[in-house]
Image: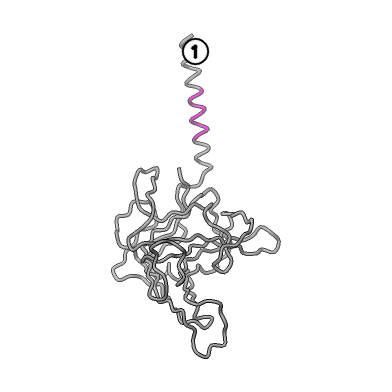
Amino acid sequence: MSRFRSLWQASVNATKKALTWELEEMLPPVEKCIFKFSSKEDLKRWHLYSDSEYGGLSSASLEIKDGGNGSDCTGFLILVPLLPSVFSGSLFTEISEGSKLSINRSGFCGMRSKKFDGFIDLDGYDSIAMRLKGDGRCYISTVSLMSQHKDKQKITHGKLLYLLQRETGIQLRQVSDFFDKATCVPLTRYLPTWKGNVIDADMEMNPGRVVGMSLSVNSQGGGFIGAKLGAGDFRVEIDWIKALRMP
């Protein structure tokens, strides 16, 4: 009887293991590199904007750092401490004299991914991770999605980030058991936004139809205690943006 029971238990265990393997094969990898910032070619995928397009005086740049040598966007163990690229500039709250354009507020800059064919499919992932080093200002991370409705309307979801002067974030435990710091935002924390403001709308995020991402800053800040506000310079060092499937 005990022999029969041991054979039956072995069969059950083998079945469970086979089902687990099949499930793992259906799931995407634990992480997916969306954008990296290690070369000039990587930076060509981004468009800069500021209030200067509407009569403001703010300006921004996205450049490779001298001596910057980022990771290859694979794995969370970072052997190179330097972040390769810098998004920086100056915020001004004044308007150009004689400007014919009228804006409600000035003092903002941003970087937005350029248009591309198709979608970035993040189905199966639950978080966005960014390796960043900030300057004490608040920044807005947005994810733009294409609606499934007939009008193909683009919907943007945003999340406010408070980036300190050191490399910031929470510790993420990966299956490799390596630890690394990264700014990590669950997709459920991204809220529907319009022109930088959160709107009261019931719009469920569809991660399978991502059409763009952006990172922006403004002089008004975001309400974090101790965050840097007002006109002046800003600077963010950046290495990569990834999607994560938390274990």
Residue 87 appears in which quarter of the rendering? bottom left
Residue pictured at 62% horizontal, 64% vertical = 154
Residue 16 colored in magenta in the image: yes
Q: Where is residue 238 shown, x and y percent of the image?
A: 38, 64
Please determine whether, in this image, residue 101 is positioned above or below residue 152. below
Magenta stretch: give its range. 12-20
Give the camera-side residue of 151 and 218.
218
Q: In terms of image quadrants, where is residue 115?
A: bottom right
Q: Position of residue 190 (x, y in %)?
A: 53, 57
> Which amino acid, by three-letter code, is at mark 1?
Phe
Label 1, residues with CA under 10 Å away: few <14, some 14-19, many ≥20: few
Question: Percent x, y for residue 176?
Answer: 37, 43
Q: Which residue corresponds to mark 1?
A: 4
Residue 167 in the magenta stretch? The answer is no
Exactly how many numbered labels are in the figure? 1
Identity of the residue furthest to the bottom in this view: 98
Most frequent secondary structure within the magenta stretch? helix
Q: Residue at x 49, y 52 (%)?
A: 186
Residue at the farthest top position: 1
> At 29% across and 58% down in the image, what residue appears?
80
Residue 42: % across, % down: 43, 67
Q: Is residue 65 left or right of residue 95?
A: left
